[in-house]
């Protein structure tokens, strides 16, 4: 039997209403207005943003010499094909 179906542990409507009147609404208080710097600080501290920046830095870093030779070898057939089509 699921836990939520256990009626002995649930509040009645009256108990829930009394708790709401006593404790207030069950919601978080509204956040105050943040300036541009506060928003920027929150965005920069996000892990996903830091990962995207790290990946971008890795992709834009200069390639090693071996990677350059491999790229040339892979692009050569494409360049030859482009020259044949252009001619």
Image (cartoon, rainbow, N blue to C red):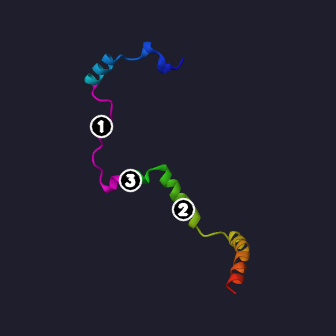
Classify mark 1: helix, strand or loop: loop
Q: Find disc 2 in the rendering and name its residue.
A: 56
Magenta residues span 23-40
Q: Which circle's residue, 1 or 3, is located before the other in the chain? A: 1
Q: Find disc 3 in the rendering and name its residue.
A: 41
Classify mark 3: helix, strand or loop: helix
x, y (%) of residue 8?
Answer: 43, 12
Within the image, what quadrant is residue 9 found in?
Answer: top left
Mark 2: give few (<14), some (14-19) or many (20+) Cα within 10 Å. Answer: few
x, y (%) of residue 2?
Answer: 52, 20
Q: Disc 2 to disc 1, how far (Cα)? A: 37 Å
**Quarter of the image that includes the N terminus:** top right
Q: Disc 2 to disc 3, how far (Cα)? A: 20 Å
Residue 44, compared with residue 63, is above or below; it is above
User: With 70 as the anchor, is 60 left or right in this view?
Assistant: left
Q: Nearer the viewer, mark 1 or mark 3?
A: 1
Q: Is the Cβ of the residue at disc 1 closer than 8 Å to that at disc 3?
A: no
Mark 1: give few (<14), some (14-19) or many (20+) Cα within 10 Å. Answer: few
Q: Nearer the viewer, residue 65 or 72?
A: 72
Q: Tell me, for residue 1, which label it has, or none.
A: none
Residue shown at 64% from the left, 69% from the top: 63
Give the residue at the far bottom of this rendering: 87
Q: Find disc 1 in the rendering and name its residue.
A: 29
x, y (%) of residue 61?
Answer: 58, 67
Q: Taken as a whole, is the magenta stretch helix, strand or loop?
A: loop
Give the residue at the far left of this rendering: 21
Does 8 appear in magenta? no
Classify mark 2: helix, strand or loop: helix
Q: Is the Cβ of the residue at disc 2 closer than 8 Å to that at disc 1?
A: no
Does 26 appear in magenta? yes
Q: Which circle's residue, 2 or 3, is located before the other in the chain? A: 3
x, y (%) of residue 83?
Answer: 70, 83
């Amino acid at each position: 039997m699921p836990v939520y179906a256990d009626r002995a542990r649930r509040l009645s409507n009256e108990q829930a209403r009394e708790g709401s009147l006593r404790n207030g609404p069950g919601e978080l208080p509204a956040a105050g207005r943040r300036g541009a710097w506060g928003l920027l600080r929150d965005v920069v501290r996000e892990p996903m943003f830091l990962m995207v920046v790290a990946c971008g830095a890795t992709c834009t870093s200069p390639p090693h010499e071996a990677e350059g030779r491999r790229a040339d070898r892979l692009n050569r057939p494409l360049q030859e094909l482009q020259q044949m089509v252009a001619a």
